[in-house]
Image: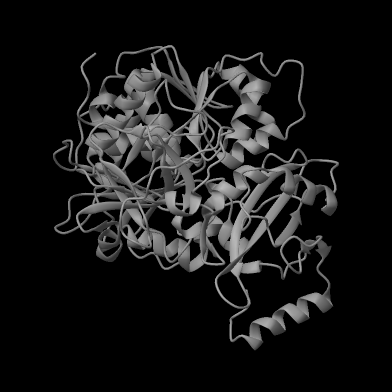
Amino acid sequence: MRSADTVAELVRRQWGDHRIGLRDEHHTLTHHQVAAGAAARAALLVDLMPPVPGGEPHLGILLDNTPEYPLWLSAAALAGAAVAGINPTRRGAELARDIRHTACRVLVTQRTHLPLLDGLALPGLRILVTDTEAYRELLAPYGDARPGDARLGPVHPGSRFLLSFTSGSTGAPKAALCSQGRLAAAGASLVSHFSVGPDDVHYICMPMFHGNAVIADWAPALTAGAGVALRARFSASRFLPDVRRFGATYFTYVGRAVQYLLATPPGPDDRAHPLRLGFGTEAGAVDAARFRERFGVPLVEGYGSSEGGAAVQRTQDTPAGAIGRAAPGDDLAVISSDTGEECPPARFSPAGVLLNATEAVGELVNRGRSPFEGYWRNPEAEASRLRGGWYWTGDLFYRDADGFLYFAGRTDDRLRVDSENLAAAMIEHILARWERVAGVAVYAIPDPVAGDQVMAALALRDGEVFDPAAFAAFLAAQRDLGTKMPPRFVRVMRELPLTATNKIHRVALRRAAFRCEDPVWWRRTPGAPYEPMTPGSMSALLNAYTTHGRTPP
């Protein structure tokens, strides 16, 4: 089939296809019904959002993963509008800021989210509540619409389609732009890479306001004519029952979701399902191996951001632990933050231990022609990404002598310990080997004198307790754990805090540091035994910050 230039064209192709196209717990729609529903919503949108000089045709979606979400994505594509995915975990002024910043003129939501909007200053915003009789009555007159009948303006590959908010871990979230052409091309690339076909069923359990679900799950399904199955919110306990019920063959993930799945009780039928692969980020080699061993499903680690500025693709010869090589058209380099020069290749011991992390780890940069399309009304953020004509990803990597790239974390998660640069993700991957932990987060807290100290939050498996001597013995046995990497502080938690996209909330962990209600163990000096932090030891530690003029965490 000829590749499509726009998302709108992909939606139109569903017309007349009466196979099952979209399902959740309560609804089943054919591809044709999806196209018809999208056409009806596009016609309604055009009437609700007439062209206004200088006005932006932006639609906000504040929904869980219900069928209305992909229906409105499809409707926006047909009408030539752009969708801003609104994060339902945001509150108050921050939530209002997201809606106002993206110039939304219509907001589609559901009754459970209406309390979030109470009292917010949102002048001129039309709100549609999808699970009400008023909404059904509003939509009814457009039931005979056909795809392409109603448009707000010309629809072409460059038409703005998504405004995807980044995580916002520092400052206000940025809304990355994605055109219809770029999303259609991303879908086609994944279809080719993973041989997605019309008989596949894509299970979308990651939130659709985030690029993971839309770009890596919905877009390839739409491109291939594959089915889509939705889970309103991720549930580890419902994952396998959903997969079996819907006949799902493909899903996307983030690393923490994989850890939740591995923490569910094993069963004799763990491999009784149709899944053939999962595609995502930050699962880590240990958890990926555990997942494949238990469920029989390979997890394919990829790299790409909502911004689309750089991509790494896996090939059949990609070594264990590596993500892959630069995608076609990208000229990727690993650049040292200290020298501004390209980092030397990684060197490994015969056992695969990285020997030169300090010099090999740097920021991944695309020196080629980047598909990055900018941020909505944020020239400062754009300038930060596009420095010196290169696209700076904000992610840490290292590269082997054959050009394979290995993920090492975010630049925000870099630690500086005794003048050595460390990547939090690399320490996490090592700590995840400890059989007693279900989840690990590593982050920097200020050293009382200079630089950083390593702190780790450990979520233990059910029934496990933290044994400081056993943990110290485990650390001593890890040959690739450098001398500066062992955690000085260990926070033991029931579960790790998460963002709305199921990523570890490191900002909250850093903010609390060792002043928290959870048990914290620490080493007074490197290599000393771990001991509980008491009010007395905390007071002495805080005094050390004051003595050296440092701000405590």
The residue at the point 31 percent across, 42 percent down is 310
Quadrant of res 125? bottom left
Rendered view: 530 above or below 192: below
* Left or right placement of residue 450 versus residue 380 in this view: right
| Horizontal and vertical percent position of residue 358 | 48, 54
Q: Position of residue 251 (x, y in %)?
A: 51, 27
Q: Residue at x 65, y 88 (%)?
A: 547
Of residues 304 and 188, the one drawn nearer to the viewer in this rendering = 304
Please, which colouring scheme is shown?
one colour
In front here: 453 or 224?
A: 453
The residue nearer to you, when weighing 534 against 433, is 433
- Choose top left, top right, bottom left or bottom right for residue 182: top left
Q: Is residue 142 visible?
A: no
Q: Please report the residue visible at 55 percent of the width from the left and 37 percent of the height from the top.
A: 349
Relative to 504, 158 lies left or right: left
In the rendered image, the quadrant that contains the N terminus is: top left
- Image vertical order of residue 8 relative to residue 540, above or below: above
Q: Is residue 391 left or right of residue 299?
A: left
* Residue 270 shows in the view: yes
Q: Which of the 4 image quarters holds residue 386? A: bottom left
Of the 4 image quadrants, the one containing the C terminus is: bottom right
What's the residue at 27%, 19% (across, down)?
13
Q: Is residue 412 above or below residue 452?
A: above
Q: Most extreme residue toward the front, as rendered? A: 350
Tell me where residue 31 appears, x and y as whole percent: 38, 19
